[in-house]
Amino acid sequence: MENFFDNTILIVDDTPENIDILVGLLEHYDKKIATNGDDALAIAFELPHPDLILLDVMMPDMDGYEVCRRLRKDGRTRDLPVIFLTARTDKDDVIKGFEAGGQDYITKPFDARELMERVKTQLELKTQREILKNMNVVLEEKVQERTIQLQEALTKLDKANKDLQGLDNAKNNFLNIISHEIRTPLNGIVGAAFLLKSVLGDNNEVSEFIDMLKISADRLEAFSTTALIITQLQAGTNAIRTETHDIGKIVDNCLATLNEYSTTQEVEIIKEQSDLMIENKVDLQLFQRALKSIIHNGIKYSPKNEKVLIKAYTKGSQTAIEVTDKGGGFSEEAMHNLFQPFGMGEKHYDKNIGLSLYAAKMIMTAHNGEIIIENIPGAGAKVSLVLNQ
C-alpha cells in the first residue's frame, strides 16, 4: 500500500496561527510553507514539486483563486491537487474555487479528521492519476512498438507478394513461350504428315507410321493449346468476351468436328432434340473448346457400338449441357482429383494424366458457371456444363 506520509504538502496561508495548526496536524508529512501567493508559486514551480497544496483563499496582493489559476496555466503544476481553505461559506465562493481549478474546498474552522481524510483522498487520487498516466505512456510505447513491427511485417509481406507476383508472371510468360514454341513446329509436322499421307496413300508400308506421327502431333498440339488457355485464364491476360449464342448450334458445331472421330471409334452420338431455342452469353471459342473436350472424352472412353447422349436444357436461371457415356465411370481416387492440374482426371479412362478437365473447369468458372461430374451406377458417367444466366 502507498505510504502517503512520504508525500510533500505545500501549506499556503498568511496567518501564522493557521500554519502552526496545519503543521501540527500534518506532522507525519513532509511540508513546505509559503505566506503569500508569489512565494507559493515559486515553491510550487521548483523541483521536486509538492504533491498537494493547501491554499488559503484570503491573502494580500494575490488571493488563492489567482494562485490556483496560475498553477493551472503552467504545465509543471497543471495537475497538482489543490484544496482551498477559507472562512467563506457562500455558494458563489465555493463555485469560484472550483472554477479556478481547485479539487476540494474546506471551510474554517475545519475539523481535523475531515481535513486529514480529504488530504488522504486527494493524495490517493493523485497517485492513481500518475499510475494511469504511466500506464498510458507504457501502452503508447507498446502501441508504437507494435505499429512499427506491423509496418515492418506489412512491408515484408508486400515485398513477398511482389516477389510472388513476379514469379507467377515469369511462370506464365514461360508457359506462354513454351506453348507458342511447341505449336509452331507442330504445325509443320502436321502439315508434313498430311502431305506424306496424300502422296504415298494408305497402302504404303509407312502409312501406319505416318498415322502414328499425326496422332502424336495432334495430341501434343491439343495439350499445348490447353496449357496456353489455362495459363491465360490463370494470369487474367485473356479476359473472356461473351456474346449471346444459340447453345444448340454450339452443340451441333462440336458434333460436326467430332463426327469423323466418333465414326472411327464406332460410337454413336445421340443428341436429344428440342424445339426450344436455348441462348446464353458465352465466349464462343472457349466454351466450344470446353464442350468439345467433354464430348471427345465421352466418345473416346465409351465401348464400341455404344452411345453418347447429349442433352441441353434450361432450368430456372440455369442452362445445362449433359454428356452421358457408357464408359467405366470415374474411380473413387479420380473423383477426389478431377480438377487438379495434371491430376487423376482421366485415370478412369486409360490411366493418362492431363489438363482437359482442369481447363474445362477454369473455362466454366470464367463464365460464372460450373462443371458437375457424377457416376451413373452400371451406366457410365455424366458430365454437365452449367451456365448461370
Image: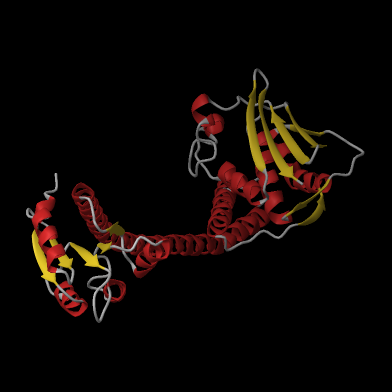
For image coordinates 56% across by 59% down, the residue present is 232
Task: Find residue 185 and report its horizontal and vertical position in percent.
Answer: 53, 63
Q: Nearer the viewer, residue 231 or 100?
A: 100
Task: State the residue lying farthest toward the top.
Answer: 378
For image coordinates 8% across by 56% down, the residue present is 24
Task: Find residue 166 and report its horizontal and vertical position in percent.
Answer: 41, 65
Looking at the image, residue 207 sits to the left or right of residue 178; the answer is right
Q: Nearer the viewer, residue 149 or 208?
A: 149
For image coordinates 12% across by 72% down, the residue present is 47
Question: Is residue 47 visible in this depiction of the protein?
Answer: yes
Q: Does 207 appear above or below 101?
A: above
Looking at the image, residue 216 sits to the left or right of residue 300; the answer is left
Quarter residue 143 falls in:
bottom left
Task: State the residue lying farthest toward the bottom.
Answer: 61
Quadrant of the image containing the N terminus: top left
Looking at the image, residue 344 sits to the left or right of residue 141; the answer is right
Question: Is residue 208 visible in this depiction of the protein?
Answer: no
Looking at the image, residue 246 sits to the left or right of residue 286; the answer is right
Task: Find residue 102 and report its horizontal and vertical position in percent.
Answer: 31, 64
Q: How is the image coloured?
A: secondary structure
Quarter residue 20 falls in:
bottom left
Task: State the residue lying farthest toward the right.
Answer: 275
Q: Nearer the viewer, residue 141 or 313?
A: 141
Quarter residue 75 falls in:
bottom left
- State how many labels appear: 0
Q: Does 44 appear above or below 4?
A: below
Q: Does 138 appear above or below 291?
A: below
Task: Find residue 128 and report its horizontal and vertical position in percent.
Answer: 24, 52
Q: Nearer the viewer, residue 326 or 165?
A: 165
